[in-house]
Amino acid sequence: MDYLYQAGKPEGKKFILLHGTGGDETSLVELAKFLDADSTILSFRGKIEEDGMNRFFKRNGLNQFDFESLEKETDDLLEVIETISEEKEIELAEWVFVGYSNGANIAAHLLLERETTLSKGIFFHPMSLERHTKSFPLSDKKIWVSYGGDNDPIVSDASFAKLVAAFRDRDAAITVVETPHGHQVSMDEVQNAREWLKG
């Protein structure tokens, strides 16, 4: 899996960046540096190609997910994160996922469906992938999520609510921010996420 690694200052946050459909490993770097200018960045490029666009797992149409691909790519992503973390001598618990749309979806799925010490996520405009099979507690997880409300043409109220409930019902600490800007990431929500990181 192609990735970009940029070491930051020792006291900076450590971000794993996962872009939306059509993005690449550079798409969220500027956003990450706004969240924390001193951050270390590990940014991945999704290895699934759909009509020339990078994604992290296959789908069979809008919001029609290929679950076999989802599970395989989730396992592969976790394995690569663990390998790089060991090489760079970074504890898994130090990382914060920062994902948008498709990237947020696979990261949220990983935290819900894989037992791991990865524990923090900032997820811009995620949705439920309708795949909630595990019940282990998530009391060590801290999650921030944003949602475009009725203006979001991709994420429905029901799908977003199901994702939030999946975390909340298993005791994750989850912060929900609604934005009027549809499926696009706005500066208001990025600023909100930056303040959340300081907590």
Image (cartoon, helix red, strand yellow):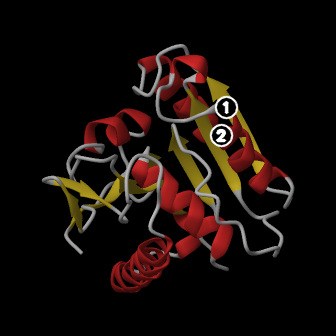
Q: Compare residues 119 and 130 and report the one nearer the observer.
A: 130
Kindly identify the residue that appears in the image at 52 percent across and 24 percent down.
Answer: 189
Q: Quadrant of residue 37?
A: top left
The residue that label 1 is drawn on is 157
Q: Amino acid at mark 1?
A: Asp
The picture places residue 52, in percent across and down from the top left corner, at 13, 53
Q: Mark 2: few, some, or many residues within 10 Å (few <14, many ≥20)?
A: many
Q: CA distance from mark 2 to mark 1?
A: 5 Å
- Report if the CB atoms under discs 2 and 1 are less than 8 Å apart: yes
Picture disc at residue 119: none
**Considering the image in quadrants, where does the C terminus appear?**
top right
Instruction: Please name whichever residue, 194 or 3, is drawn nearer the observer in this view of the structure.
Output: 3
**Callout 2 amino acid:** Phe
Q: Looking at the image, which residue is at 42% across and 19% down?
A: 187
Left or right: residue 187 compared with residue 122 = left
Q: Which residue corresponds to the image point at 51% horizontal and 60% vertical from the top-left?
A: 107
Q: Which residue is mark 2?
A: 160
Element at badge 2?
A: helix
Which quadrant holds the N terminus? bottom left
- The residue under the point 50% across, 71% down is 67
Give 12 or 124, whichever is nearer the viewer.
124
* Percent of width and height locating residue 87: 33, 85
Q: Residues within 10 Å of mark 1 (few under 14, many from 20)?
A: some
Residue 13, visible in the rendered structure: no
Left/right placement of residue 26 relative to residue 9 reads: left
> Is 82 drawn above or below residue 151 in the view shown?
below
